[in-house]
Amino acid sequence: EWHCQILAESVGKNAKGLTPISNIAPEAHHSLFQLYLGGPKDKFFSLFFVKEEHKDKMRIAALHKSIFDAGFSAIEEAKLPCRAF
C-alpha cells in the first residue's frame, strides 16, 4: 500500500501519472488477471514476494511462492513489462 501511495503522489501530477493497484494474492487474482492479460496492454507490473521463515508455516509459504511464481510466469509469457522483488 505504501508503494502505491508513493507512486500516486510522486507521478500523479500535471495530468500524467500511474494508477497503482495493490493486490494481495490470491484474493481477486482471477478477475484481475483477466484484466491484466486480456485487457489493454498499458500496464507495468511490480510483484513483491515476502518470504515467510516460520517453520510451522512452511506449507503455506510454499503455496504462496507457487502462486507468486505462477502469476509472474503468466505476465512474463504474455510479454508484459514486469519486475519482481
Image (cartoon, rainbow, N blue to C red):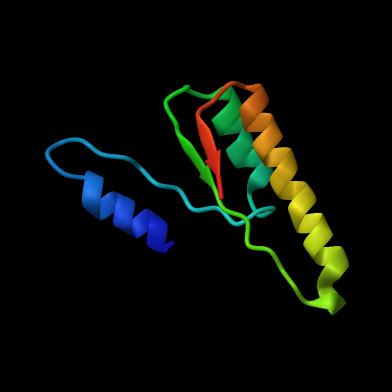
Residue 6 lies, with reference to residue 11, above or below; the image says below
Q: Where is residue 20 drawn, in percent x and y?
A: 40, 47
Q: Where is residue 63 drawn, in percent x and y?
A: 82, 56
Q: In terms of image quadrants, where is residue 84? A: top right
Q: Where is residue 23 drawn, in percent x and y?
A: 55, 53
Residue 38 lies, with reference to residue 21, above or below; the image says above
* Left or right: residue 2 compared with residue 70: left
Q: What residue is at 44 percent from the left and 62 percent from the top?
A: 1
* Left or right: residue 64 compared with residue 55: left
Looking at the rendered structure, the number of numbered marks drawn on it comes to: 0
Q: Where is residue 4 drawn, in percent x and y?
A: 39, 54
Front-lying residue, 34 or 54: 54
Residue located farthest toward the left when viewing the structure as drawn: 14
* Left or right: residue 17 compared with residue 56: left
Residue 26 lies, with reference to residue 50, above or below; the image says above
* Left or right: residue 69 compared with residue 12: right
Q: What residue is at 79 percent from the left and 49 percent from the top?
A: 66
Q: In terms of image quadrants, where is residue 62? A: bottom right
Q: What residue is at 68 percent from the left and 63 percent from the top?
A: 51
